[in-house]
Amino acid sequence: MKKFEEKTIKSETLFKGKVISLKVDDVQLPNGKTSKREIINHPGAVAVLAVKEDGKIIMVEQYRKALERSLLEIPAGKLDEGEEPKVTAERELEEETGYGCKSMSHLISFYTSPGFADELVHLYIAEGLYVMEDSKGTDEDEFVELVEITVDEALNLIKNQVIYDAKTSYAVQYLQLQQALKNS
Amino acid sequence: MKKFEEKTIKSETLFKGKVISLKVDDVQLPNGKTSKREIINHPGAVAVLAVKEDGKIIMVEQYRKALERSLLEIPAGKLDEGEEPKVTAERELEEETGYGCKSMSHLISFYTSPGFADELVHLYIAEGLYVMEDSKGTDEDEFVELVEITVDEALNLIKNQVIYDAKTSYAVQYLQLQQALKNS
């Protein structure tokens, strides 16, 4: 898929951080003119939809500095270099929630902000959850609180903008869809 | 929602571009230690789910330089400064597809990448579509091709990673949910 390809004339990396890096590319457009593209490179991430046998979804509340507020989200985290996404998913579920799972299946992957970033999120579904006895806990600069809610509660929290991010909204809608398909 | 708030000790803006800006904040964590947060500020965007009377979804194919490939997405675009999202939605639908609509309703908003960016996407649903006679067309550095597909085709394109972004995957799943609810 290279339709309307924009050829790189010059690429300048302006920032390399711990998580993201920023470059500005001069590009040649399909009509021959030139333009600039501001691009964020990101290592990619996973998110985990984990539903307990009682139907409750496992979520975490955490502060998001970019938004200057906390959000309620499904467990998620960045890929370590060279790490297989499924391994990241199992690690993040354990670290953020203390739960292990019998199976971890890939549901969908999507780019979150294709207009300016290459972040790809891999969404997994965890089944057969059990409490781990000696969970590793979160990274030292990460603070999260476990919250377990029903699909109906999640829908209310979407309305109230407490759940307010794309991957979690997608996951909640996925559960709604499964319920509706079961009833049809 | 300020749980686990991270207080800003120092904030340094390292880049101000045409679309995004980048800052690095030194923060004080809830345990008193300090850390750094790399943050992208973005003006926000809209996306438009537009379904024709024959059930086909209006999408656009466009090149995404951040990914070095093209994607098939629902029409979308950045907010101009001070612009009301609904107005942006009407403008982007017209510019990218040549369609006008009788009603444009807000469906959901979500942050796309809360871990590092403040981009908020407002998803609208356009109904009563009609072809505009003198459409304005896209910006001069924007090249898109109109593609109209059914929900089933969209699901296949998700499988084949031609549709591969969060807002479009959410919108397609929304249509699946509406179909399932109608049948239940």
Image (cartoon, coloured by chain):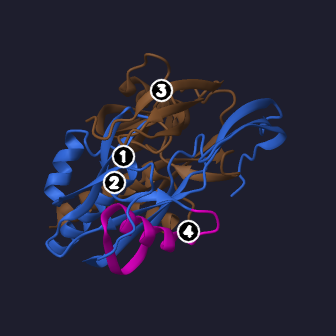
Chain colours: A brown, B blue
Nearer mark to the viewer, of 2 and 4: 2
Q: Return the x and y of residue A4 as percentages of the image width and height.
A: 32, 41
Q: Residues within 10 Å of mark 3 (few under 14, many from 20)?
A: few
Nearer mark to the viewer, of 4 and 1: 1
Question: What chain letter is assigned to the residue under label 2?
Answer: B
| Image position of B52 with respect to A66: above or below | below
Tell me the residue that label 2 is attached to. Answer: B168
Q: Residues within 10 Å of mark 2 (few under 14, many from 20)?
A: many
Q: Amino acid at mark 2?
A: Thr
SS class of the residue under badge 2? helix
Tell me the residue that label 4 is attached to. Answer: A160
SS class of the residue under badge 4? loop
Residues beneath discs 3 and 2 located on the same chain: no
Q: Residues within 10 Å of mark 1 (few under 14, many from 20)?
A: many
Marks 3 and 4 in Cβ contact (< 8 Å)? no
- Highlighted range, magenta: B80-106
| Image position of A94 with respect to B105: above or below | above
Residue B98 horizontal side relative to residue A61, left or right: left
Q: Return the x and y of residue A99 as percentages of the image width and height.
A: 46, 35
Question: What chain letter is assigned to the residue under label 3?
Answer: A
Residue B104 horizontal side relative to residue B51, left or right: right
At 57% across and 60% down in the image, what residue appears? A162
Q: Is residue A51 something one can see in this rendering?
A: no
Marks 3 and 1 in Cβ contact (< 8 Å)? no
Nearer mark to the viewer, of 3 and 2: 3
Q: Is residue A82 magenta?
A: no
Tell me the residue that label 3 is attached to. Answer: A9
Corner quadrant of residue B148: bottom left
Q: Amino acid at mark 3?
A: Ile
SS class of the residue under badge 1? loop
Q: Return the x and y of residue B41 as percentages of the image width and height.
A: 64, 47
